[in-house]
Image (cartoon, helix red, strand yellow):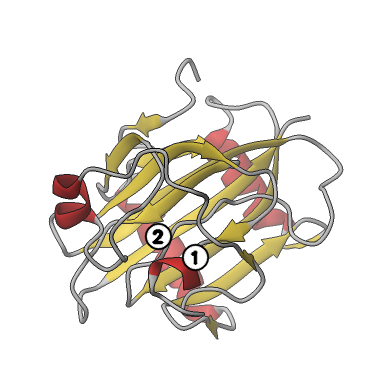
Amino acid sequence: MKNKIGKIKNLIDQDTVEYFLNKYETLPKKDNGARINADTMVDQDFNKLFYDKLAKILSPYFTGTINHATVYSDYLPGGIHSDGWIATPERTKLATTFIIPLVSEYDNNATLVFNETNEEAITYNKATGLGDKGITSYRQEELPAAKKVLGADIQKKWLPHLDEGIPFSLAEILTWEVGTAIYWPRINLHASAWFPEQTNRKAIVILTNEL
């Protein structure tokens, strides 16, 4: 991929969307306070057929390995975090996060990607007013001193669920389209845009590493 942040239009067709949605229904699930996760694999513990299917879908766009994949259903917008390593650094270099929307009822579903980075999986949920919602294993961090804050117009439109004064600079707003992947480096901070409760919103997130 030439761009480190972007979209892959129509990566999967509707039949594959339905495959992932059916996978979600059959897997055991965990509720983290904002999202219901159906983990399909974590590094060494995964279903090989499912791994091979994902690897084939992504193969034209990256040459690394898939570390983790989760099909999930959001019911609250999440906070700012990175998709880095948890507890100890991973064996190979962190690569790309891919999200493929499967259901997106709300027209303005999006993910905001920031320029700031962290190789560890961290979150600013408590620091931005969300408390522990949406977090089970990421380390909570305090916000850094603000040299410059996110513009009020962007905050109001995309992140009204977070406290004002976000000290990060926006790299990209990636709007959601069913079947179209969005992607960014795992180390980049990012957050879900606001969406209304009681809306149906499902996706698969895939974390990758370099070879």
Figure check: 177 above or below 143? above
Figure check: 133 above or below 179? below
Quarter occupied by residue 199: bottom left
- Left or right: residue 86 versus residue 26 is right
Give the amino acid type for the residue marked by disc 2 in the picture. Ala
Quadrant of the snapshot with the C terminus: top right
Q: Which mark is residue 61?
A: none
SS for tag 2? strand
SS for tag 1? strand
- The 10 Å Cα crowd at callout 2, few under 14, some 14 to 19, many 20 or more, is many
Q: Position of residue 12 (x, y in %)?
A: 38, 43
Quarter occupied by residue 62: top right
In front here: 111 or 126? 126
Figure check: 86 above or below 134? above
> Mark 1 and mark 2: span between their CA atoms?
6 Å
In front here: 48 or 171? 171
Q: Residue at x 70, y 51 (%)?
A: 120
In front here: 191 or 62? 191
Give the amino acid type for the residue marked by disc 1 in the picture. Val
Q: Position of residue 99 (x, y in %)?
A: 44, 49
Q: State the residue position of label 1.
A: 71
Q: Residue at x 36, y 62 (%)?
A: 18
In front here: 79 or 148? 148
Q: State the residue position of label 2.
A: 203
- The 10 Å Cα crowd at callout 1, few under 14, some 14 to 19, many 20 or more, is many
Looking at the image, tell me whether mark 1 or mark 2 is earlier in sequence order.
1
Q: Position of residue 117 (x, y in %)?
A: 57, 39
Is disc 1 in contact with disc 2, using a CB cutoff of under 8 Å? yes
